[in-house]
Each structure stands twice: as C-alpha cells, then as structure tokens.
C-alpha cells in the first residue's frame, strides 16, 4: 500500500508530537521556537546528503508500494518528514524535562571545574573520537559493518563538536534533563521502527548490516541510529541553553536583551571568554534560589514558569524581600529592629537618592560594612535600577509594623497594631501590595517596556490590589498559627463587633465568632480579587499565565477556607488545597489566561 510509511507518521509520530505540543504550550517561549527551528534546519541539512547516499548505494530501500512517491535527492517525502518530526519530538521532551532547571547556576563549572567534570569531558571526547574512527574503519572494511560504520562516522563528529563546546555544561545538568530526554523518545522510536520493519515499510539490505537485532526484527544499526540522533538533538538543545544562560545571567556582557535573543547574541555568547563570567553573581543567584526553596516552595515552583532575565530578576527580588523580612523578624529587641530598618532605608537611599544614585562602589562598601555576610548577595544583586523605589520603602515600613507584635509599649494599640480596617489595608499594601507592584514592574520592563503609561498605571494598581487580596487570604488561613505567636491581624474594631478582644483570639483562636471574622475577611479578599483580576489580563502574554497561575493558586486557598464546613483537610490550623485541585487551577490559568 502506497501509504504505509505515511501511516506510520499518522499513527505514531504526529499524535505524539501533537500531545507534547499541547502539554508544552503553556511554557512555550519564543526562544524555544528559535531553538527547535534552528535544530530542525541543521538536522535536515546534515541528514539530507547522508540519507541520500544510503538510498543511492542501496543500503536503505523502500518498497515502491510503501511510499506516496515524491522524493528529494532520492529520499521519500515521508523520510524527509521524519527528520523534522523526530527533532521536534525529542526537543519537546528536553524542554519539558528541563523547564524546572535554573540554567545560570550550571555556569559555575565553566571556569575551574571540579575534577570529575574536567575528566568526564575528556573521557567523553575520547569515546566520541573512538566511535568516529571505528565507523570510518567499518566503512573502509566494507561488508556487514558498512551501515553501522556510516551511522557512527556521520553522527559522532557532530556529537563531538557539541560536546566540545558544551561538555562541562552538559555534565553538570541532572540526568533528568540529559539522559532521560534521550532515552524516552529513543525507546519509543525503537518500537515504531520495529513495527515498520516488521511490515516491510523500509528495509536494510543484507550484506551491509551485522544481522544482530536488539529485539524482534529491530536491527542493531537502526537502534543505534535513533540513539545517536537523539543524542545529537539533546546535545544541540543543551548548547543553546548554555549560550542563553550566559546571555541572561551576565548583564555586564549583555546589558540589553530583547524578548528573544538574536542569533548574533548567541554567537557572541559562544565566543565570550569564561574569564569574563561573573561567578560571584552566579554564587549570589545560588544563594537566592536556596533562600527561595527554603522559604517558599510554591513560589519557587511558580517561578520556574517564567523565562530568561525576568525569571532571574524575580528570584533576586524575592531574595531581597525575604532577607529584609528575616532581618527584622529575627530581631531580639526594638532597638535591633530600628537598627536594621534604618540600615535598609539607607541602602535604598544609596540607590534612589539623586545625590548618590548609581554609586555602585559606595553601595557595595556600605553592604560590606552594615550587613552580615549571608545578607550581602541579596542586597548586592537587587535589580534596583529597574524597580520603582516607593514600593521598596513601603515594604520595609510593613516589616517594621509587623515587629510591633513582638516589641511594643504597654498600650493596646501598640501591642496589637491592626486597630481597624484602614490599618489592615495599609499593612496589606505594605507587605503584599508592594510585592505585586514590584513583580509587575519587572514583567513590564522585560516583556513590554514600550507599554503605554495609562496601561502601565492600570496594571501596577491592579497588582497592588491583588497583593492585598492575597495577604487577606494569608491572614484568614493563618489565624491559629499567628495566635500561637501572639499575633492577631484581624482588626480590633471587627473583634469588638463580635464581643472579642485580641487577647481572646490569642487564647482561643477557634470558634464561631473567629470563624465569622475569617469569612468576613475572605469576603473582603474576594472583593479586591474581583476588582483586580480582569485587569490582570493586560499583563504581557509571556508572563500572564504564570502570574495568574500563582494568583489563582493562592486564591484557591481562600475558596477552600470557605468550604471548611465540608470537611476540608486542616494542617496546623491551615487549610490545604488538594494536589489535584491545585494542578487543575494552575493548568486552567496557563492554558486560558
């Protein structure tokens, strides 16, 4: 039947490619199109003359009744399509499995690598050279080893080239993003090839093959071909990721990065000297990621959905916010709180006051002088130049307000500072609204810096409102946990309406009256959410899904809290969102935002 080979694609390769496309759609970025498109072009051009030679030499044959008919240099159109679809499928596996990784961290081995990486690269190069020469030997010898020799002599010089330029980076990556995306599509294509060979869709001529089968009728040469080509694809993707990581991680080498790095920038990153790499910055990024993992696993996972320099700057922003909060929160006296907030305000002054603005040396000296060593990287690498100053100052003010629960005078309002709804809103604006505004400021800077001022103001205002909504949900969730620390964020005026005092909540954080106030607070949270959520659709597309996904995941906690009477799981007084429900919420945001 003339459609046998085409049916292989219709049954096995196209459906898998379509499924992977749907799965990868929410995380697809224009740089992925550049990666995949470039690899498809390279693989097509590299395979075309080699495959044509196999067919013209009668090593590889196709029964006339198995193909539609059109050929290019003797290669059936179905085979040409295989060059494209295999590259696409394996590239998607690599992207999906590599998405959680933060690639800049893997640049630390580019200079003075650990001994095992240096040796591993040399050993890997040696193996690839040996396989290449073995292939050449088999070709010269002729006979049953010819086809295997042609595969090795064609594929592994390309593998040697990519491993030479990115071997250290590849060896540093976890096996889940190197070996696994090679093995999964390879095994799948082995099974497809086994079915096709069994039906006679294509064949390897006897006398040019060893006659060994991996299983069934799958010749060892065919198995080697799919393994070798998938190694080439994954290595090629890793080369791109190394160069992209260099572009994104080092602003001193690439001050301005467009939404998608240009091919010229990739070439420049290839030839940048490793001595120019700012490994101190990489160490700072590592500290920031560790802080993010330790303090907010959910934000860490959400951050992986962002890309490029935006992802880096969001991590650095969170690291600063977390550090500032810890410095104030871990203080042992009111005087220590005042000391840290004064130092943080001065740090911001050095960035934003006109008389000293941009004095990097002075800022670095002050960080060394005023802060402990573990705080330095979070302060040094804050992307202050592209952040508005007002939210940062207000953030410190919010942490200062928080400290009043621990250090206060004898008055009731000082001991429990959230005296009324205005104070609650002010607190939410400071500790959460500011963070929302700062995140959106980074998104605009990296995704759409030319955004009209009116739309920019609308998004900044909406992000601040949404931040307050999320903080209200956080307070509603943590009433019991906060009470254990002597903190009550429910407004005192609300408590009085229920016949309670803050001390009553500290002593008995559960009960009908507290539950009434929790629901009232959630009502306020959802009012703010309803006001801000439609406006967030104006966030640039590259960041809209991840941002809305993070918001919806948190608001889902509020929805769960409203369902408490339905037997929702509690953990130390906190409502937890079931994993399946959380995943559904994220996917809805990613696919439909």
Image (spheres, helix red, strand yellow):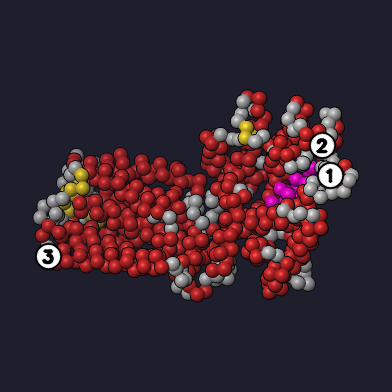
| Helix, strand or loop at mark 2 | helix
Marks 2/1 in contact by CB < 8 Å: the verdict is yes
| Helix, strand or loop at mark 1 | helix
First in sequence: mark 3 vs mark 2: 3
| C-alpha span from label 3 to label 2 | 89 Å
The residue under the point 12% across, 57% down is 144
Percent of width and height locating residue 443: 62, 54
First in sequence: mark 2 vs mark 1: 1
Write down the quadrant of residue 35 in the picture. bottom left
The residue under the point 82% across, 37% down is 502
Q: Label 3: how many residues lie within 10 Å, few (<14), some (14-19) or many (20+)?
A: few
Q: Which residue is mark 3?
A: 141
The stretch of residues the image draws in magenta is 422-435
Nearest to the observer: residue 472 or residue 590: 472
Residue 71 in view, yes or no: no
Q: Label 2: how many residues lie within 10 Å, few (<14), some (14-19) or many (20+)?
A: many
Q: Which residue is mark 2?
A: 502
| C-alpha span from label 2 to label 1 | 9 Å
543 lies left or right of 358: left
The residue under the point 17% across, 53% down is 60
First in sequence: mark 1 vs mark 3: 3
Q: Is residue 429 magenta?
A: yes
Q: Is residue 328 magenta?
A: no
Q: Which residue is mark 1?
A: 415
Marks 1/3 in contact by CB < 8 Å: the verdict is no
Instruction: Say above or below: 161 vs 472.
Output: below
């Amino acid at each position: 039947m003339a459609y046998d080979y085409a049916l292989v694609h219709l049954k096995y390769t196209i459906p898998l490619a379509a499924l992977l496309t749907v799965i990868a759609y929410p995380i697809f970025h224009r740089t992925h199109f550049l990666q995949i498109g470039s690899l498809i072009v390279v693989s097509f051009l590299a395979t075309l003359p080699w495959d044509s030679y196999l067919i013209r030499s009668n090593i590889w044959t196709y029964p006339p009744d198995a193909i539609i008919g059109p050929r290019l240099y003797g290669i059936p159109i179905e085979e040409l399509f295989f060059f494209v679809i295999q590259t696409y499928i394996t590239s998607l596996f690599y992207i999906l499995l590599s998405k959680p990784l933060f690639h800049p961290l893997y640049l630390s081995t580019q200079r003075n690598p650990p001994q095992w990486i240096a040796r591993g690269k040399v050993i890997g190069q040696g193996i690839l050279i040996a396989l290449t020469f073995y292939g050449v030997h088999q070709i010269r010898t002729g006979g049953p080893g010819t086809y295997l020799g042609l595969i090795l002599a064609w594929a592994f010089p390309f593998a040697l080239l990519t491993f030479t330029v990115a071997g250290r980076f590849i060896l540093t990556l976890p096996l889940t993003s190197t070996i696994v995306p090679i093995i999964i599509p390879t095994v799948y294509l082995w099974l497809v090839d086994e079915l096709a060979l069994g039906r006679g869709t294509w064949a390897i001529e006897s006398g040019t093959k060893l006659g060994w089968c991996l299983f069934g009728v799958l010749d060892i040469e065919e198995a080697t071909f799919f393994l070798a080509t998938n190694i080439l694809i994954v290595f090629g993707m890793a080369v791109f990721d190394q160069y992209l990581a260099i572009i994104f991680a080092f602003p001193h080498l690439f001050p301005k990065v467009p939404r998608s790095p240009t091919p010229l920038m990739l070439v420049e990153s290839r030839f940048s000297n490793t001595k120019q790499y700012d490994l101190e910055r990489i160490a700072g990024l590592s500290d920031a990621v560790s802080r993010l993992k330790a303090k907010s696993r959910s934000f860490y996972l959400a951050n992986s959905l962002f890309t490029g320099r935006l992802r880096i700057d969001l991590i650095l922003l969170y690291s600063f916010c977390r550090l500032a909060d810890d410095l104030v929160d871990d203080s042992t006296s009111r005087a220590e709180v005042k000391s840290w907030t004064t130092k943080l305000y001065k740090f911001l002054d050095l960035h934003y006051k006109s008389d000293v603005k941009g004095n990097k040396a002075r800022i670095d000296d002050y960080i060394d002088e005023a802060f402990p060593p573990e705080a330095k990287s979070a302060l040094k690498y804050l992307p202050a130049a592209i952040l508005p100053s007002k939210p940062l100052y207000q953030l410190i003010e919010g942490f200062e307000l928080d400290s009043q629960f621990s250090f206060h005078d004898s008055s009731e309002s000082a001991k429990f500072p959230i005296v009324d709804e205005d104070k609650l809103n002010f607190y939410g604006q400071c500790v959460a609204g500011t963070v929302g505004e700062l995140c959106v400021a980074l998104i605009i800077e990296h995704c759409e810096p030319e955004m009209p001022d009116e739309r920019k103001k609308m998004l900044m205002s909406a992000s601040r409102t949404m931040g307050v909504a999320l903080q209200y949900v956080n307070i509603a969730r943590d009433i019991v946990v906060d009470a254990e620390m002597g903190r009550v964020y429910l407004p005192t005026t609300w408590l009085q309406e229920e016949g309670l005092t803050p001390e009553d909540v500290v002593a008995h954080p559960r009960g009908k009256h507290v539950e009434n106030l929790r629901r009232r607070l959630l009502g306020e949270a959802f009012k703010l959410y309803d006001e801000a959520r439609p406006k967030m659709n104006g966030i640039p597309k590259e960041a809209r899904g991840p941002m809305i996904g993070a918001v919806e995941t948190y608001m889902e906690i509020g929805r769960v809290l409203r369902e408490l009477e339905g037997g929702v799981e509690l953990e130390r007084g906190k409502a937890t969102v079931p994993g399946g429900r959380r995943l559904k919420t994220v996917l809805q945001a990613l696919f439909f935002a």
